Image (tube, rainbow, N blue to C red):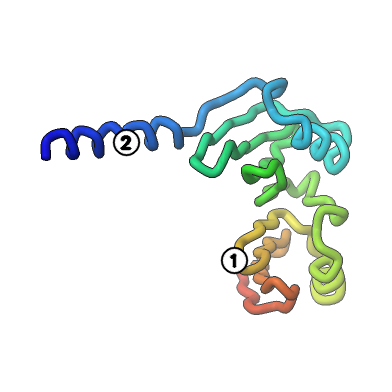
Amino acid sequence: MRKFVLTGIFAFMMVMTACSDKPVAAEQVPEPIKVFVQQMFPGQTITYAEKDQEVTGAKYDVVLTDGTRIDFDADDVWDKVEATMANPVPTALVPAPIVTYIQSNFPDAMILKIDKGHNGYEVELSNGMVIEFNRNFQVIDVDNDD
């Protein structure tokens, strides 16, 4: 029994150690992430990066020179982008049906945050609106975050 408990504690400690966020140099960020930043955020560079080693692979969170924060999954694909009023989320990054909906319904608003989830997207606008879309890009909730 003692051996089983010790093995369990050791396994737990290994998982906790492996699943911790660690700062890394911008040069250590995978190439696909660097290319994504260059293409979608021209003129911006990575000023801070964090690696989160999980059982499923390494995830990265980066901060750009303008303050934009981007989370990447284990496949180096963006999960979440949090931008600033000065430099909102590029529309080229947002699925076309979402862009169309926002331009039609909130023409003066900018996208400040987009978050991909398992069931769809959540978008926060500069006017305080938070809109949730399902996988088929249908609006499932609209809320005023103010």
Badge number at residue 11: 2
Q: Nearer the viewer, residue 129 or 24?
A: 24
Q: Residues within 10 Å of mark 2 (few under 14, many from 20)?
A: few
Quadrant, the N terminus: top left
Say which amino acid is labelled 1: Asp
Looking at the image, which residue is at 62% across and 38% down? 61
Secondary structure at badge 2 equals helix
Residue most toward the left?
1
Looking at the image, which residue is at 58% across and 31% down? 50
Q: Write down the residue under mark 1.
A: 145
Looking at the image, which residue is at 81% across and 39% down? 36
Quadrant, the C terminus: bottom right
| Residue 17, horizontal then vertical, whole percent | 40, 30
Please say if 79 is above or below 11. below
Q: Nearer the viewer, residue 26 or 8?
A: 8
Please say if 25 is above or below 1. above
- Residue 142: quarter of image: bottom right
Q: Nearer the viewer, residue 26 or 2?
A: 2
Looking at the image, which residue is at 86% across and 75% down? 104
